[in-house]
Image (cartoon, helix red, strand yellow):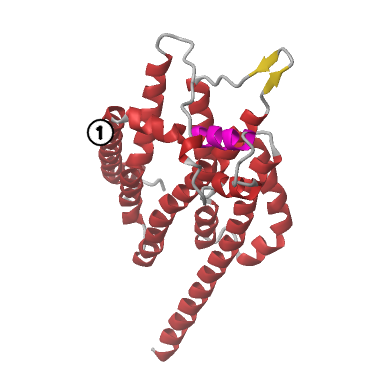
């Protein structure tokens, strides 16, 4: 007896699933159009203010140059500890020490394409909340109510953690890396080796570090979502702590400039974020256990 004889036709099943699939594709297209539109609008805004954005990103270079000038002049009453505080953004560089810096553009349209890349990068960052919200709106219908409520905090935590990573780059990593690079110059005895940075190379350095730190700081979000999905648990994360620390330092060595201070600047916060991730997963497990116990009591009472 075949399927059609008993009233079952595989083509009917395919036809019945076609409409929901088309609905999902139409909704996905709408969400993508909104995301692309948000990026396009953000790109226009960022390109209109690209000069201000670029000067903002060049500020760490100015601070590094000022710190070097203070150090070379003997520092006056600014000792090495004061320079360290200024380097990490706790103390301001003396206004008189700040000097104009020179970045080179070696191609006729290099600055223009640099502005395009910078505007695109800033537009994605600016439009990220809209992109994240559209992603949530697309997957939310397939989630239970408690899963939707659990997913929402991560939409808030993700941009906050990205901004924390970007702030660490802007106020600590970049000034130190640039100060270290400027300190390697050689002037004297008929030899002059000076740092002449290209505009495109500086922007590449800045955007690479911002992305590396911003994405690395998503570690608690990724591990918490994995714990929420049951892929990892707190016991597994605790037992794998030593391997995680080794992996963190390997990643830090890959994505940061080749100096130990830069690597430590990324690795130490990531190790702390890993410990926070263990705590977050443990809280998720505790809440899930409590909900299961309450559900079991309700079943028994019925």
Identified at 36% across, 61% down, the residue is 148
For this orientation, the residue located farthest to the bottom is: 301
Question: Picture coordinates of residue 210 (x, y %)?
Answer: 50, 39
Assign the magenta stretch its main secondary structure: helix
The residue that label 1 is drawn on is 41
Q: Quadrant of the C terminus?
A: bottom left
Task: Say left or right for 252 vs 22.
Answer: right
For this orientation, the residue located farthest to the front is: 76
Q: Which residues are magenta?
A: 61-72
Task: Say left or right for 302 vs 63.
Answer: left
Name above or below for residue 292 compared with residue 255: below
Question: Picture coordinates of residue 106 (x, y %)?
Answer: 49, 11
Identified at 34% across, 32% down, the residue is 52
Task: Say left or right for 9 vs 162.
Answer: left
Return the residue nearer the eye: 60 or 153.
60
Question: Picture coordinates of residue 287 (x, y %)?
Answer: 49, 74
Question: Is residue 231 highlighted in magenta?
Answer: no
């Amino acid at each position: 007896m075949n399927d059609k004889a008993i009233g079952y036709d595989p083509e009917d099943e395919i036809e019945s699933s076609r409409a929901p699939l088309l609905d999902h594709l139409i909704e996905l297209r709408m969400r993508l159009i909104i995301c692309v539109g948000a990026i396009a609008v953000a790109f226009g805004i960022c390109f209109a203010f690209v000069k201000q954005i670029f000067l903002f990103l060049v500020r760490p270079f100015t601070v590094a140059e000022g710190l070097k000038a203070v150090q070379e002049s003997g520092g006056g009453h600014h000792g090495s500890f004061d320079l360290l505080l200024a380097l990490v953004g706790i103390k301001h560089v003396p206004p008189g020490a700040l000097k104009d810096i020179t970045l080179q553009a070696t191609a006729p349209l290099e600055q223009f394409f640099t502005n395009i890349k910078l505007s695109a990068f800033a537009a994605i960052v600016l439009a990220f909340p809209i992109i994240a919200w559209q992603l949530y709106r697309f997957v939310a219908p397939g989630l239970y109510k408690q899963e939707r409520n659990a997913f929402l905090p991560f939409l808030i935590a993700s941009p906050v953690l990205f901004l924390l990573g970007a702030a660490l780059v802007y106020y600590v990593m970049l000034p130190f890396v640039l100060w270290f690079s400027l300190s390697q110059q050689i002037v004297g005895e008929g030899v002059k080796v000076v740092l002449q940075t290209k505009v495109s190379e500086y922007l590449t350095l800045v955007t690479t570090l911002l992305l590396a730190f911003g994405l690395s700081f998503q570690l608690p979000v990724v591990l918490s979502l994995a714990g929420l999905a049951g892929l990892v648990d707190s016991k597994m994360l605790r037992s794998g702590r030593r391997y995680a620390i080794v992996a963190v330092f390997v990643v830090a060595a890959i994505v940061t400039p080749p100096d130990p201070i830069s690597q430590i600047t990324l690795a130490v916060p990531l190790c702390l974020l890993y410990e926070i991730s263990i705590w977050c997963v443990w809280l998720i497990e505790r809440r899930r256990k409590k909900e299961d116990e309450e559900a079991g009591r309700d079943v028994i009472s019925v």
